[in-house]
């Protein structure tokens, strides 16, 4: 092998083989990632009065061909509240389960953080949280207007705004009116445009 050949070989290794090895090492964690599932919930849909019923969708997602059924249950909900899931454990994921919360008539007003637990057929466990907001309905029978903000920002939203779903359950803060939100130093969201 002449010196020229050796030089060409080295060059080829540098341009092709080394980047190839780096790429394989980079992809490896994704190839070796074990099958799993994910659990998520739309954080806020509104407020319920004591004695009312609130329904939300819990989404069970599949990661890397996860093949076991996932069973759902809930913890840390206020006493006197009944929680049911339908369906409760579906062998085919991804799927959505409707979580129905029948709020007891003596549940105190305020925020209640409910822990939702998914247990897979192979013992894997994931949790997510939902903030149940319980608020007495006003005298005229209409729930008072309510807006949502995050403790980590200064923007308030309509509860149906897509940004509300991005707020972590523990950071959710409710306002009884636009005045209430402004009094706390919050400004209206430019996307959902709640009343000012
Ligand atoms: Zn918004």
Image (tube, helix red, strand yellow):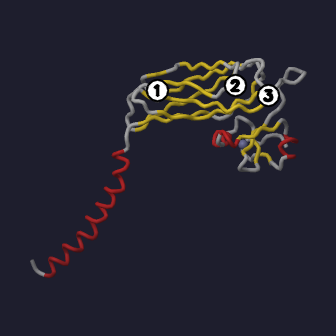
- Which disc is residue 45 wearing? none
The percent coordinates of residue 165 (x first, y second) are: 64, 39
Whether residue 11 sits left or right of residue 107 in the image: it is: left
Mark 3 or 2: the one toward you: 2
The residue carrying mark 2 is: 78
The residue carrying mark 1 is: 70
Is the C-beta of the residue carrying label 3 under 8 Å from the nearest atom of ligand 1?
A: no
Determine the secondary structure under disc 3. Answer: loop
Whether residue 5 sits left or right of residue 166 in the image: it is: left
Q: Earlier in the sequence, mark 1 or mark 3?
A: 1
Mark 1 or 3: the one toward you: 3
Whether residue 178 sits left or right of residue 84 in the image: it is: right
Mark pair 3, 2: CA separation:
11 Å
Q: Residue at x 65, y 35 (%)?
A: 43
The percent coordinates of residue 161 (x first, y second) are: 70, 38
Label 1 CA crowd tier, 10 Å (few <14, some 14–19, many 20+)? many
Query: Which residue lies most toward the right here?
Result: 139
Label 3 CA crowd tier, 10 Å (few <14, some 14–19, many 20+)? some
* The C terminus: image quadrant: top right
State the image quarter where residue 115 is shown: top right
Nearer to us in this view, 142 or 174? 174
Q: Is residue 2 above or below residue 167?
A: below
The percent coordinates of residue 51 (x first, y second) are: 76, 17
Q: Earlier in the sequence, mark 3 or mark 2?
A: 2
Label 2 CA crowd tier, 10 Å (few <14, some 14–19, many 20+)? some
Is the C-beta of the residue carrying label 2 under 8 Å from the nearest atom of ligand 1?
A: no
Q: Quadrant of ligand 1?
A: top right
Are dots 1 and 3 in contact, CB under 8 Å? no
Q: Is residue 195 above or below residue 102?
A: below
Q: Residue at x 82, y 32 (%)?
A: 145
């Amino acid at each position: 092998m002449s010196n020229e050949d050796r030089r060409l070989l080295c060059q080829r290794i540098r341009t092709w083989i080394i980047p190839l090895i780096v790429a394989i090492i980079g992809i490896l964690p994704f190839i070796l990632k074990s099958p799993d599932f994910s659990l998520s919930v739309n954080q806020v849909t509104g407020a319920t009065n004591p004695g009312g019923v609130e329904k939300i969708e819990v989404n069970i997602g599949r990661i890397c061909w996860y093949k076991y059924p996932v069973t759902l249950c809930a913890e840390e909900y206020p006493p006197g509240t009944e929680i049911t899931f339908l369906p409760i454990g579906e062998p085919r994921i991804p799927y959505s389960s409707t979580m129905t919360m029948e709020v007891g008539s003596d549940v105190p007003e305020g925020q209640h953080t409910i822990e939702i637990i998914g247990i897979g057929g192979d013992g894997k466990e994931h949790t997510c949280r939902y903030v149940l907001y319980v608020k007495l309905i006003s005298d005229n029978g209409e729930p008072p207007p309510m807006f949502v903000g995050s403790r980590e920002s200064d923007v308030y939203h309509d509860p149906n705004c897509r940004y509300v779903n991005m707020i972590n359950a523990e950071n959710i803060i409710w306002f009884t009116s636009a005045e209430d939100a402004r009094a706390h130093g919050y400004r209206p969201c430019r996307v959902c445009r709640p009343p000012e």
